[in-house]
Every structure is written in C-alpha cells, then in structure tokens.
Amino acid sequence: MVVDGYRELERMLREFGLRQLEELAWGWQGHGFGPAETAQWLTAGVGADEPQLAAALAAAEWTPAQAGRALRGGLTAVQAVRDHPDGARRARELRALAG
C-alpha cells in the first residue's frame, strides 16, 4: 500500500476511529517510521498505539507483509511478538525460524 504523505495517513487513522492523531503520528515518527511505513504496519495488524511493536519487528528484519502473514500455528508474527514479554527477542527468534 502506498501512502502519499501525512494527509493520507491521517485519513487512514480517522477511518480507524482514532482521535489523537498528532500524538500517534509523533510516536511512529519517534521510532523512525514515515507515513507510508506506518500505514503498512497498521495494515499488517500493528495497533496505532504500538509503534514499538513495529520497531521490534523491523529491527529483526521483518517486513510488514511478512509480519502480517500467518505462521505455523495460525498466529502472525505481529500477534506472537505482541503477546511475548520480551517482544524484541521474540521477533528475532521468529525471524531465525522463518528463515
């Protein structure tokens, strides 16, 4: 999905029913994500208030498309990392298993 600047991201976030757009955008920007990347992670299943989850996955070399696909057992990498107390470590472990 290609997002043209922050206006498109803002529109997308409003569709999700989010109100604190500036605060959310700053959170994503603070983790190094631009509007297009943010939209891709949101589409992959990362919550709008979870930029740290996307950052952990990205640091472990997951793309949004890969992280949003079901792994063995039916969970996505997004779900598995979200549910783990040490998400960054879990993201790396899953990446090593996925190859």
Image: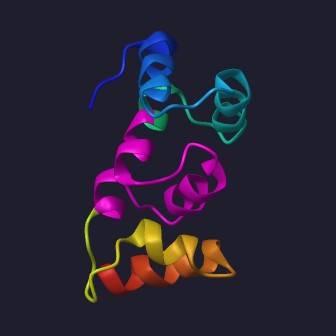
Residue 18, percent from left and from top: 57, 31
Q: Quadrant of residue 96?
A: bottom left
Residue 36 within the segment the image draws in magenta: no
Quarter of the image with the C terminus in it:
bottom left
Q: How many numbered circles does the render carry?
A: 0
Q: Residue at x 42, y 25 (%)?
A: 12
Q: Provide the residue span drawn in magenta.
A: 39-68
Residue 67, percent from left and from top: 36, 62
Q: Residue at x 59, y 62 (%)?
A: 56
Q: Main secondary structure of the magenta part?
A: helix
Residue 98, percent from left and from top: 31, 80
Q: Residue at x 49, y 84 (%)?
A: 93
The reply, left or right, for residue 98 in relation to residue 8 is left
Q: Quadrant of residue 85?
A: bottom right
Q: Residue at x 45, y 34 (%)?
A: 16
Here the colouring is rainbow
Q: Nearer the viewer, residue 10 or 30?
A: 10
Q: Is residue 52 shown above or below 90?
A: above
Q: Is residue 59 shown above or below 37?
A: below
Quarter of the image with the N terminus in it:
top left
Residue 48 within the segment the image draws in magenta: yes
